[in-house]
Image (cartoon, rainbow, N blue to C red):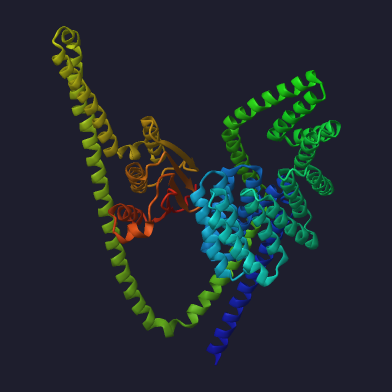
Amino acid sequence: MTQRFMRKTIVTCCFLVLTWHIGKCDIDTSVIFKNAQHAFQIQTQLPDSALNISYRVRAESLKINWERGVAYGSQRLGSIYQAKGQLDSAALYLNEAWQIRKTLKDHSGAAGTAGVLSSVYNKRGMTDSAMSLLIQKSKLAEKTQDTSLIISSYVDLGLLNLDYGYLDKSEFYLSKGLSLANNILNPHSLARVHSGYGAYYFNIRRYAQALVSYSKSLRLNKEMGNIHETALCNENIAVCYINMKQVDEALSYFIESMGIYTRLGFMEDLSVVQFNIGSTYNKLEQLDSAEYYLTNALALSQDQGDVEQSVSIYEVLADVAYKKGNYQQAFVYQQRFSVLSDSLLDANKVSSLAEMQTKYETEKKEQQIVLLDQENKTKAAQKKYLIAGTIALSLGLFVLGFYYVQRNRLAHRNELIAQQKIETLLDEQEIKTYNAMLEGQEEERLRISTDLHDRLGSMLSTIKLMFSSLGDKIDKAQEENKLQYEKATDLIDHACVEVRRISHNLGTGMVASFGLVKSLEELCDGLNQTGKIRCNFKSHKMDQNLPVHIEIEIYRIVQEAVNNTIKHAKASVIDIQINRLEDEINMHIEDNGTGFDLQAKKKSGGLGLVNLEKRAEKIGGTLHIDSYVGRGTTVILEVPIEKQHD
C-alpha cells in the first residue's frame, strides 16, 4: 500500500512540474504569435516597422526552439523583402518557412508560403520552379479541403500560365476556380476569380469582356468593404476604357481610385494613379490639367525615391510642354528624362551591393537583439536548471522505488546494450574503411592529374616549342610541307587543351586544398570561358568548410549534373546556388534547356539519375529532380549537417 502511494505521489509531482513549464512556454509563444500577426497587419503601411518586428519574432522563436514561430517570422520577412524588390533575401527566408512548414505538415501554411515563393521565382525568371511550387500549393490546398485556398491556387495557376502564354491552360484553371466559387458563393473567392478572368480577357485584347469581369470584381469588393482592392479594380477598368478609346470614361475611374489612395495614405499608388490621370488628360488635349496631375505625381514619386516612375513622368511632361509651345521647358524635361534613364542602368549595377549591405544589417540587428536579451536568457537558464533538477530528483526517486522489481530487466537490458555497442563499433569501422578508400581514390586521381599536367603537359609544350623553331624554315619549304606543319601544330594545341581538361576533371583534390566554393567558382568560370553557355554561381553562409568527403561528393554531383546539361539539354544558361541553412546544405542547379520526361527516364533505368542519387545517399543527403519537356531541369540537393558551436 505504501509503495503504491509513493508511486502516485512521485508521478503527480512530475506532472505538476511539467504542466507548469508547458504553460509558461504557451504564454511565451502566444506573445510571439501576436507580434507576428501585428507585423502582418502593418506590413503594407509601415514595412520597416513590420521588418523589425519580424526579425524579433524569428530570433525569439529560435531561442526557445519553436519551429512554428520561426516559420511565422521567416514568412513575414520573405513577404516584406518581396514587396521591397529584394528577391534574393525574400527567397532565402521564404525557403526556410517552406521547409519548416512542410516538416510540420502544416498544409495550409505551406500552401500560403508556396504561393508567395512562386511569385518571387517568377520575378527572378525561374519560371519552372515557380510553376512547380504552384502545383505543390494546389496539392496542399486539396489536402486541407479548404475550398477558398483551392480556388486561390487555381487562380494563381491561371495567371502564371497566362504569363507563359498558355491561354488554354490559363482558362482551364480559371474556369475550375469560378465553378468552385459559384458553388460556395464566397464573395472574396468570386472577386479574385473575376479579376483573374479580367486579366485573361485583357491579355487576348477582348477589352469589353475584360471590362465585364473587372466590373463584377469591383461590385463584390465594394460590398465586402475591401477598399484597396476596389481602387485596383477601378484602375483596371480605366485601362480597359482607354484601350476601347473611351478616354472620358477611364478618367472617372482613375479619379475615384485617387480619392481612395488619398484616404488610405498609399503614396506610391497615389503617384501611379495621378500619372495615369495626367496621361489621360494629355490624350484629351487638356494640357493644363495634364500638367497639374503630372507635377503632383512627380513630387510623390521623388518623395518615394521611385526613379523608374519619375522617368515615365518626365517623358509625358516633355510632351505636354511641347504641345503648349513651351519648347525650352520641354527640352529641360527631356534632358532630365535622359539623365534618369541612364541612372537606372547604373542602379542595376549596384543592386547586388545593396543586397549584401541589407544582409549585413540583418545579421547586425539579430546580434543586437541577442545582446539585449542576454539578461533574460540567464534568468531563464537558471529556471530551466531548477526545473531540470526537480525532474531529475523525481526520476531518481522513481527509479529507486522500482529498483528491486527492475533488477532482472536491467540485467537483460545491459546485455542488449553491450551487443549494440559491438555493432556500433563494427559500423564505425566500416565507415572508417569507406572513408579511407574514398581518400585513396581522391589521392590517386590527384596523382594522375599531376602526372598529366606536369609530365605529359610539359612534354607537349616542349614539342610545340621545337615545332615553333621550324616555322621560319617551313616558310621556305614547299606548300604541302607547310600545310602538314600547320596541321601538326594544331593537333599539339588540341592535345595541350585536352590534357589540361582531363587534369582538371580528375583533380578534385583541389576541393580538399581550396574548398568547395572555390572549386565550384572555378568550374563555373571554365564553362563561361567556352562562350557557348553562361554559368551563374551564388553561395550564402558558406564561410566554414564541410568535411572533405562531403565537399567532394557535392562537387561530383554538381559536375555530373552540369555534364548532363551540356550533353543533352541544349541549354544556354546554368544557375548554381549553394546555401548553408541552420542544419543543412541546400544546393540548386537549374538550366533553361529542353528538359525531359522524369518518369519515363526513371522507368528506363537511366544510369545518370541513379549515380546522382547514390552519391547523395553516401553523404546522407536527399536529391530532388524537377524537369518537364521544353521547360528545363532543376536539381535540388539537401544535405543535413551537424550544428557547430564555438
Q: Where is residue 344 in the image (x, y as percent from the top left)?
A: 64, 30
280 with respect to 27 (left or right): right
Q: Say which quarter of the image contains residue 180.
A: bottom right
Residue at horizontal 31 percent and vertical 56 percent from the top: 610
Q: Where is residue 157 in the image (x, y as percent from the top left)?
A: 57, 57
Q: Nearer the viewer, residue 185 or 521?
A: 185
Q: Nearer the viewer, residue 105 or 391?
A: 105
Q: Position of residue 327 (x, y in %)?
A: 78, 19
Residue at horizontal 68 percent and vertical 50 percent from the top: 207
Q: Which of 227 and 427 is in front in this view?
A: 227
Q: Say which quarter of the image contains residue 98.
A: bottom right
Q: How many marks?
A: 0
Q: Check the picture and name the quadrant holding the N terminus.
A: bottom right
274 with respect to 478 (left or right): right
Q: Where is residue 629 in the image (x, y as percent from the top left)?
A: 41, 52
Q: Which of 367 and 350 is in front in this view?
A: 350
Residue 68 visible (yes or no)? no
422 is higher (above) or lower (below) than 319: below
Residue 116 visible (yes or no)? yes
